[in-house]
Each structure stands twice: as structure tokens, then as C-alpha cells.
Amino acid sequence: MSDDESEKREGRSVTFLEPAKKQSPWANLRSNFLTGFVVFAPISITIYLVWTFAEFVDARVLPLVPVVYKLEDYLPISLPGLGVVVFFFIVAGLGALTKGLFGRQLFRIGERFVDRMPVVRSIYNTLKQIVETIFAQGGKDSFEKVCMIQYPRQGIWALAFVSTDTSGEVLARSGSRKMMSVFLPTTPNPTSGFLLFLPAEDVVILDMSVEDAAKLVISAGLVTPPWGAVAEAEAEMARREAAE
């Protein structure tokens, strides 16, 4: 009696593994290209954006540097990004000057001069208020929370960023006890969007970070950030399967 017949009588079945199908050269080349593109695209785009920004700053800052201090005249090659370094020290020096008594007085004189210019005054005051709100020490919670809101109608959810708790006339005339100011970004450009004032109970705060939310918006939902609860559930399921 053969081995196969004896195994069948014992109630066991024999499974033979079929050889894996060999991919065609074109399919293999296409797979390698897609894998390489996933690695190459983020690196190349990042380098391009950083290089473009450095060239943009260099073209506007380096002409202001005296010829005596230009390193390009002493080196055989040009150094991209030198203007960014110079710009950093210029801004840092301006900050140090403003902290002093003389710098504060000079700054106040300049602000009074700007306040007398109709159009420039509105632009300057708006930009100043935005920058101070973002970088103020008291505004640590600004744009550090991600939320979901129902927009543009009930049943449709949109991703947004929490700006701050609404106050002032907007809160007083809304009739709500507590409201939240949220910024609703557009896809794929999250720098533009809409400012919305919503009752606090209509805002669902999420666990994801601002960076992960920005990736989700920019990718039009293709890049879904991992969620801690899901990861813990998958890990628990894996542990149970391993125990069994």
C-alpha cells in the first residue's frame, strides 16, 4: 500500500504547495519602479523645496551684505543657503535690539509713523495681531488640536483645526454659553480655508496631531494616520492569537 493511501485512511490529507507564479519582466520592472518612486519622491521634493527657499532668500539678502564679508569672493564655490544664515542673525539681532530701552523707543516711533498711513496701517496691524497670537506664550493651545465638524451640512464631516475659544462680541451675540473658533482647511492646500464659529458641543476633538491631520488633508485622505486605540486593539488580538 502506498504512503498516500495510508495517509488517507488515517484521516490526514496531503497538501502540495504550488510553485509561485513567476512575474513577467515588465511587471517586475513596474513593481520596482513604484517602490523606488515611493522612496525617491518625498526626498526629491523636500530637497527641491528647501533649495528653492534658500535661493529665494539668498537672492534678496546677499545683495545687502557688504562685499568684504561675502564668502563667495574667498571660496572657489558658492554656498547656497548663506543668505538664510545671514537672515537668521539679522532677525536675532533685531530681537535683541527691541528688548532694550533704546530699541523699544525706536520701535514705538516706527509704529506711530505706520499708524498714520491708511492702507499700510491696516495691513501691518492685522499681520502683527496674527503673528503675536501664534507666537504668544499664552496661546500655547492655538492650532494644537484637531477636530471634526459637520460641514457643509449635517451628516457630512470635515477635518478642522481648533484656533481658540471664541470670545468677544461673536460669543455674546451667538446666544451660546461656549463656542470654539476653528479653521477649516481646503485640500490639497491647507493654508487656505474658512474660519468658523461653532458651539463647543458640536466640535469633536480628535487624538491625532496637527502634523498627521495636515498629511491627511494634503493627501486628500490617502494617508491615514495610525490611531492609538486601533493599534492597541490589533496588538491585543495578535497576543491572543499567539497565546492560542
Image (spheres, grey):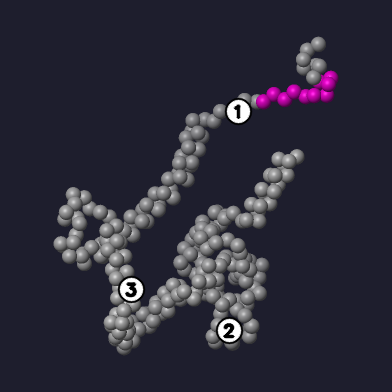
* Residue 194 shows up from this direction: no
Tell me the quarter of the picture where residue 18 sits: top right
Q: Amino acid at mark 2?
A: Leu
Neighbourhood count class around disc 3 (C-alpha, 10 Å): few under 14, some 14–19, many 20 upward? few
Residue 141 tag number: none
- Return the residue nearer the eye: 193 or 3: 3
Q: Is residue 100 above or below residue 160?
A: below
Q: Earlier in the sequence, mark 2 or mark 1?
A: 1
Please provide the residue range marked out in magenta: 8-17
Q: Which residue bears the numbered disc 2? A: 171
Q: Which residue is mark 1?
A: 20
Type of the residue with mark 3: Gly
Q: Residues within 10 Å of mark 2 (few under 14, many from 20)?
A: some
Q: Are marks 1 and 3 in contact (CB under 8 Å)?
A: no
In the image, farthest residue toward the top: 1
In the image, 125: left or right of 83?
right
Which amino acid does the dot numbered 1 rest on?
Answer: Ala
CA–CA distance in space, label 2 to label 1: 66 Å
Q: Which residue is mark 3?
A: 95
Quarter of the view holding residue 17: top right
Residue at x 31% of width, y 58% of height: 54
